[in-house]
Amino acid sequence: MTGWSRASRRLSRGFSDADSTAINASSFTFESAAGRLDRDIALADLNDGEGIARGKIVITQGSNSATVDLSKAVTVNDVLDAINSSGLDIAASTEGGALKITGGSDFSISNGSGYTTAASLGIAGNSTGGTLTGDTVYALTGNTTLGQLNDGNGVFIGTDVGEDRYDFTITVDVSDSIDTNVRVNLGSVWETIDGELVETEGAVKSMQGVVDRINTAIADAGLGSSASASISNGRLVITNALGRDIDVTEAKAKSTTAANLGILGNATGTLTGEQRLSGLNTTLVSNLNGGTGLGGDGILNFTARDGTAFAIDISSAQTVDDIARLINDDAGNGGRLSVSLSNIGNGLQVTDSTGGSSNLIITGDTAESLGIATDVAGVAEDSVTGTNLQHKYFGMATRLDDLNSGAGIGTGDIRITDGNGVSFTVKIGSDSESVFDLVTEIQGQADAAGANINVRLNDKGDGLMIEEKDGEPDGGTTILVEDVSGTVAKALKIKGESSGTGDDNFIDGSAEVEVEFEATDSLNEIAQKINDATGSPVRATILNDGTGSNPYRLSFSARATGVDGRFIVDDGGLGLNLSTLDEGNDALVFYGSSDPAKAVLLTKSSNTLDDVIPGVTIDLNTTSEEVVNLTISRDSDKIITAVEEFIAAYNEVLNRIDFQTRYDSETEVRGPLLGESTLAILQSTMNRTSLGEPIGVDDEFSRMSQVGITVGEGGKLELDRDKFRDAMEQDFDAVAELLTAREQITQETETEIEDGVFVRNTDISEQFSKLGLIFQFEELADNYLDSVDGIFTNKDKTFADQIELQEKRIEQFNIQLDAKRVRLERQFLAMETALASLSSQQSALLALQG
């Protein structure tokens, strides 16, 4: 191992003290580095997915020569940094899909002895005029994986099951009266064999797979001679040989497969898709502004500070680098203005080098779209720093496990209440794999409940939006999202309440975290507010370096280690002047050879490798340049401990049942649940399961007693450690199958009720072809504890309903008693009045007698 996974760390300029001086900060905004516009590319993705030959290159410039070691390079930036640190008068950058090296004088680049690294990078050769532009090593081809497209957002492919599933439709116009709909399935292929639905082919992974599936679907529709798909100039192309119309539509609402491939829309004769693979170290224009792309007519109007006015058309730009190149190389510009990324990296910066004194002016709708527009008078500055261009990094194809720096969102139930008070609960389980699964699940439950809720990707392209439906009357109260169980809503940053009704009745789950401050806040108070902010990707601490009059610095550290934890900080113009202490790199392990160039490169965002050797977890405790040998053996004691923990939990459940249902004949003390049939049934089911056999397992062991797990007094489980250990040594796989086998039967998840309209099958229950005894207990527990329809949940609801009924009856009795009390009090008062009257009359009579 040579590199340890570390957290990204940034350090501010110095301040005089930490607890008394007001910093005058207004707000800081934190976001994942995925929001940057210069996305780094893995070397493994170059050369049609074949990667490069790591090793050494030799750069010769005049009488000087430098050997650059790229044996441990992982990304394109690693290569650029190494070349730029060679000590020669050269600078390495990227252009399109190639490396570009420029120098103060001519130079040559060759392979190091015994290596082919320079050739594999496309830069072996001699410069011309001090410039060497390498061969293209990064371009869209048939081998390009779908995960690389759209700046790593990938292509959404549905996971629904069925023989008739499909992802988009190509409508081919074959005559004046005939249009043929070609349904294209890029997902798993399903067939019914011997009455069972079987997956016969997995979902496509590459662009060639997409082309093949489209052409197969066209041929199956009888249009093989009329239409076809291909890849041309890095784009997907669909051709109608008859020169007639082609129209591509999505299969269902909220699906984005065709759009992700760049072919959504229509054309006559040939439909040429949009570019979906950026160049090296840049991002797609189509992913700017949350995925809406470039606005306006594509014309930027400039007036440099020397008074020169010119306009530049950037409508042809497909990447952010294209935008910069079109502006910087424009003849009318003549080098007066240059465009680069802003210091933060999520926007552009325009710099004027004329030395003039007039205002720098940038106008036009496209300038507004790029966040670099000034007002008509301009600014008396040499540069304009653009706003956040909201690079999209959250889409329907995004895997839920990848969110929150790889921590995912977990599982659980969320409850959503619309503006009319209509509530519904959504159960998010492990079967929800993508953002699309999540969106369709929430939307489906909302529609089923009649709730005025729409779920979509937000406008920033970094999260979900929960809002009211267009065209529906506004609700009278705010939208509310709660976690019933688990922390799914919190992890999605949608937990909470909207800020108001009407136009404000929405919840935006943006990954950006803005922390607001008082102008009087000290450095300590700022750090505390950052640490208290929900969803903040960083921790803030105060560092006293003990030097000078401003020794106190604000330090930011990523909460997640590795590349996934890298972050952006916008200090709101305060001027923190952040320096990078640690980029935040993944752990690098070179496996199989002492020479990194020949070894297999393993990378991980954490310091734990759990997928290198099946069943083995390797903890990386420190860095090392020396070869480390690992001896791997099965940890039987840990397995036995886990079994003992299960047995202890099982027996504890029985103890609690016994206590709640107890009866002491001597004291006649009864448990509160004595006679409750639910617990008796649970106890019986647990006992039956412990004595039963695994489902679908035909192996050496078929009962737990055969491996040392037996039923003792009172139905409690007991473990014979020696017998269990002997069983593992005899046939470990058979023990594993007995306890932990789990294979689920695939069922159709959606039904098409009419052309292009799908509904989710709500009557599907999990079925298993294999299920070990431990997982049988898990299913039993879920059956009782499910927060929506579990047996205990329903029983609790029944008790709550009964209690509520009794409380209502008591309330009614109290009303009746109150009325009777009033009546009796009136009768008593009347009686007292009568008695008083009689007493008075008696006194009068006695007086007369006297």
Image: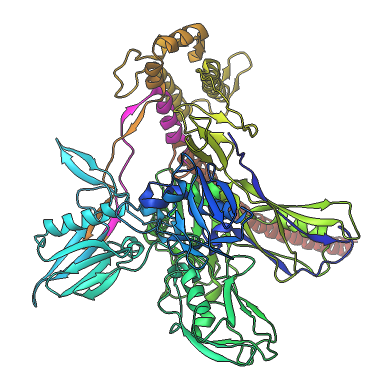
Say which of 560 and 696 sits in front: 560
Say which of 768 and 367 sits in front: 367
Disc count in the image?
0
Please tell me which residue is depicted at 33% across the width and 54% down the height of the picture.
157
The percent coordinates of residue 597 (x first, y second) are 49, 38
> Can I make out residue 483 in this image?
no
Residue found at the very far front of the displayed protein = 63
The percent coordinates of residue 618 (x first, y second) are 55, 29
Q: Is 301 located above or below residue 835 in the figure?
A: below
Q: Quadrant of the C terminus?
A: bottom right
The percent coordinates of residue 793 (x first, y second) are 48, 40
The percent coordinates of residue 244 (x first, y second) are 15, 75
Q: Quadrant of the N terminus?
A: top right
Q: Is 726 located above or below residue 602 in the figure?
A: above
In the rendered structure, which segment of residues is drawn in magenta?
Answer: 758-786
Please tell me which residue is depicted at 49% across the width and 53% down the height of the picture.
109
